[in-house]
Image (cartoon, helix red, strand yellow):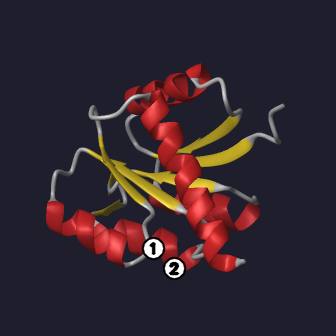
Amino acid sequence: MKSRPIMVLLIEDDPNHARALEAMLERVKEFDYILIHCYKLQDGLIELKTSNYDVVLLDLRLPDSEGISTFRSVHNNAPEVPIVIFTALFNDEIALQTLKEGAQEYLFKGEFDGQDLSNAIMHSIARVYHLSS
């Protein structure tokens, strides 16, 4: 028996990547996901203030923000929401720094499938829930 759908906020400027992620999550049978997509960081921050999300999928390269400051903006505005970073930005230093500062997962675009993404989401939620209880 499935529990309630997992509310996912996707902050990603590339509509092709957004469609690909949505298709990946649709193929996962263990969980139901509701994906809300924002193209810009500022739109995502507004969405985080107005709705409840279980997890944020965050690209680090957006039209209005880039790099670790993108992560910091989201984390500072919603520190209780797990963040899974997925990006084409192949930078181990940024990856490690975001993880040190509170990101739960760091995935490289094109390097994961739907099951990997679902696992990253569910593990992130489990870790944050465990830490807060």
Q: Amino acid at mark 1?
A: Ser
The residue located at (50%, 25%) in the rendering is: 24
The residue located at (53%, 58%) in the rendering is: 124
**Disc 2 designates what residue?**
76
Q: Nearer the viewer, residue 131 or 8?
A: 131
Q: Nearer the viewer, residue 132 or 79?
A: 132
Q: Mark 1 and 2 residues: CB-CB less than 8 Å, in contact?
A: yes
In the displayed structure image, the side of residue 66 where residue 36 appears, left or right: right
The x, y position of residue 69, in whole percent, is 33, 72
**Number of residues whose C-alpha sits closer than 10 Å to that of mark 1, classed few (under 14), some (14–19) or many (20 or more):** some
Looking at the rendered structure, the secondary structure element under dot 2 is: helix
Relative to 108, say whether 58 is above or below: below
- Quadrant of the rendered image containing residue 73: bottom left
Disc sitting over residue 20 in the figure: none
Asked whether the viewer can see residue 29, the reply is: yes
**Disc 1 designates what residue?**
73
Relative to 38, say whether 92 is above or below: below
